[in-house]
Amino acid sequence: MRSFPTPLCFPTLPGLDCRPLVRENAANIMALQAAMLAALPDPCWYYPSDQDMFERCCERGESFGFWDGDTLAGFGTLTPWWVRPETCYAARIGDPTVLTFDFQDVMVHAAYRRLGIHSALLRLFEDVARSAGGKALYCTIAPENTPSVRSFEKAGYACVCVQPAYGGMLRGYYRKRLV
């Protein structure tokens, strides 16, 4: 079994601590997800995950979070292609899958927005993917979620296509080539 690439260093943000998330943090993730969903202008912007999925991602070392003391301010998950080769985002749109990574389940609590958490996670995951020889990063975004679209485009992601996902909801599939 492959292991998740270890980040060479963690991003720093004033007053926040970035670290890998562990299985025991899944309850914190679920609480953050509930708060984030309640604050969204449209709940269709985000497809929620269940606690079991978060626990598995944490066990594999794919999830990282920013903490303010005991409060999870934001987190993200980066899943390598080998975890789900037939259903990773690259496979869903017909791209080669080897050496690709899926940026998924990024969340930032409303009280911690505009502090750079989302951008720091984007940089961290790009560094992790590059250190593992990654060729591309992928994510999906609801087309109406313009704040996320802008954030990913600013970081160099481009929309490859828009197609149904997650039970028929339209999603833009975004890719950032690393080579």
Image (spheres, rainbow, N blue to C red):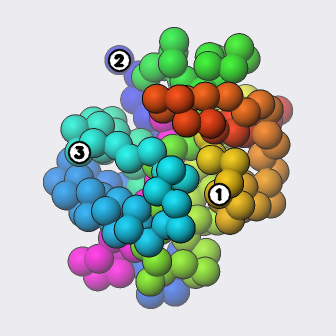
In the depicted structure, whether residue 117 falls above or below residue 64: below
Residue type at mark 3 is Gln
- C-alpha separation, residue under disc 2 versus residue under disc 1: 36 Å
Residue 58: image x %, image y %?
30, 44
User: Which tag, 2 or 1, sits closer to the chain's start?
Assistant: 2
Give the quarter of the image for residue 4: top left
Q: Is residue 74 left or right of residue 170?
A: left
Residue type at mark 1 is Asn
| Quadrant in the picture for the N terminus | top left
Magenta region, main secondary structure: strand
| Residue ID at (46%, 29%) | 167
Residue 111: image x %, image y %?
44, 83
Across the whole image, how many numbered discs are drawn on residues? Answer: 3
- C-alpha separation, residue under disc 1 versus residue under disc 3: 24 Å
| Quadrant in the picture for the C terminus | top right
- Span of residues in magenta: 65-80
